[in-house]
Amino acid sequence: MKESQIKKQGAKTNPYGSNQYLLDPRQKMCWDLYIDPKSKTFGNAYQSALKVGYEDGTAKQITTFDWFIEKCRRLNLLGKAERNLDKILDLPLEDKANIVLDASKFVAKTLGKDEGYSERTEHTGKDGLPLIPDAETKKKIDKAIDEYLED
């Protein structure tokens, strides 16, 4: 839906036509202002929401929205994972510690990829060769598949 169509319909609280599949760009801007210590609205969800164009009533309730609650939950979960990693560094290696460490690493690398906890995986064959087989290898694979399907 185009912005001009939205204005004709009188929609003010949803000018971008967002829904469960199409996010409102103001959501990201609001969150970024809310968590940025350099922002004048840092830590103030209401002011952050107003600054990106939400109406007063919507801005007052922004912290009750599912997307906002989920982002807070994930931020808290990442914080817990980081605290666990710090604690684990001082513990002797035991089975229990390894489980906590593995769980913390998983959370950190999945939820904290934008904060530097990412992991890179190479997608190449042996010695860096491409995964796409050459013509001779492809023929052998096709032959093996054909033989398997005949059985």
Image: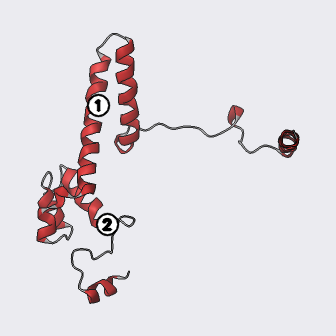
The residue depicted at 32 percent of the width and 82 percent of the height is 3
Q: CA distance from mark 2 to mark 1?
A: 29 Å
User: Which residue was labeled with disc 1?
Assistant: 82
- Quarter of the image with the N terminus in it: bottom left
- Where on the picture, by quarter, is residue 75? top left
| Mark sitting on residue 107 | none
Mark 1 is on which residue type? Glu
Image quarter of residue 55: bottom left
Q: Residue at x 15, y 53 (%)?
A: 42
Q: Is residue 1 above or below residue 121?
A: below
Is 68 in front, or is 150? 150
Which image quadrant for residue 23? Answer: bottom left
Q: Secondary structure at mark 2?
A: helix
Is residue 47 rendered to the left or right of residue 136? Answer: left
Residue 20: % across, % down: 36, 64
Task: State the residue in front, 30 or 22.
Answer: 22
Assess disc 1: are there few (<14), some (14-19) or many (≥20) residues with their C-alpha within 10 Å of its C-alpha. Answer: some
Q: Which mark is residue 25?
A: 2
| Residue nearest the observer in this picture, 107 or 135 | 107
Does residue 45 appear in this view?
yes
Mark toward the start of the polypeptide (2 vs 1): 2
Image coordinates of residue 123 in percent, x first then y, are 62, 40
> At 24% across and 54% down in the image, what residue appears?
68
| Left or right of residue 54: residue 105 | right
Work out whether 14 lies above or below 117.
below
Q: Pinpoint residue 124: horizontal percent, then vertical percent.
A: 66, 39
* In-image side of 94 versus 37 (left or right): right
Q: Position of residue 136 (x, y in %)?
A: 88, 42
Q: Amino acid at mark 2?
A: Pro
